[in-house]
Amino acid sequence: MERPVLQPILAPFDGFHESEHAVTGTCLISFDRNRYSVMSRAARRTVQVRAYAGRIVIRCGEEIVGEHERHFGRNRTIYDPWHYLPVLAHKPGALRNGAPFQDWELPPSLHRLRRRLGHGDEADRRFVRVLSAVLTDGWSRSRRRCAKRWRAERSATT
């Protein structure tokens, strides 16, 4: 009965609730009684949080600076370690001790590389350079470059 007079929907419905939040110096926002990480370049700025049913999207202006699964419990801190990569360039020791990196599940090949590089400040610096390359060049390109360099180093020592 009503169908002939209904207007067509021109775009998909994007249902979210938006609110403004301040980012702390530790790159976290508080939302819905939990804390979520954002990219370090958004530290100490105001961001907009778009809360969907199952996820939140955090924007600083037009740029997305964080996206997480939405958690409905209380007092949880949800980290994305990639958000803190620029901080690691200045403080590589945080890779071993920083809260965002404590439970970081690295892909198996990165985990192997981390073990091969060893421990200590210099190993941390080298691994941070690899992670930075992954962020800028992509995983497959960085992986090929690491494998090539690893083979060259192995052949030089034998």
Image (spheres, grey):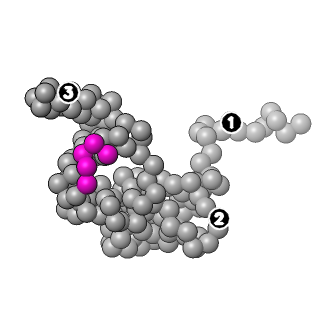
> Any magenta on residue 118?
yes
Q: Is residue 99 visible?
A: yes
Q: Nearer the viewer, mark 1 or mark 2?
A: 2
Check the image and report above or below for 102 versus 141.
Answer: below
Looking at the rendered structure, the secondary structure element under dot 3 is: helix
Q: Report x, y in % for residue 149.
A: 18, 31
The quarter in which the C terminus is drawn is top left
**Which residue occupies the foreground of this view, 152 or 8?**
152
Q: Which residues are magenta?
A: 115-119
Kindly identify which residue carries mark 1: 8
Name the residue: 24% across, 45% down. 117
On the image, which quarter does residue 8 sit in? top right
Q: Report x, y in % for residue 85.
A: 29, 55
Check the image and report above or below for 30 versus 83.
Answer: below
Q: Tell me if 79 is positioned left or right of 11 in this view.
A: left
Name the residue: 21% across, 32% down. 150
Name the residue: 33% across, 30% down. 140
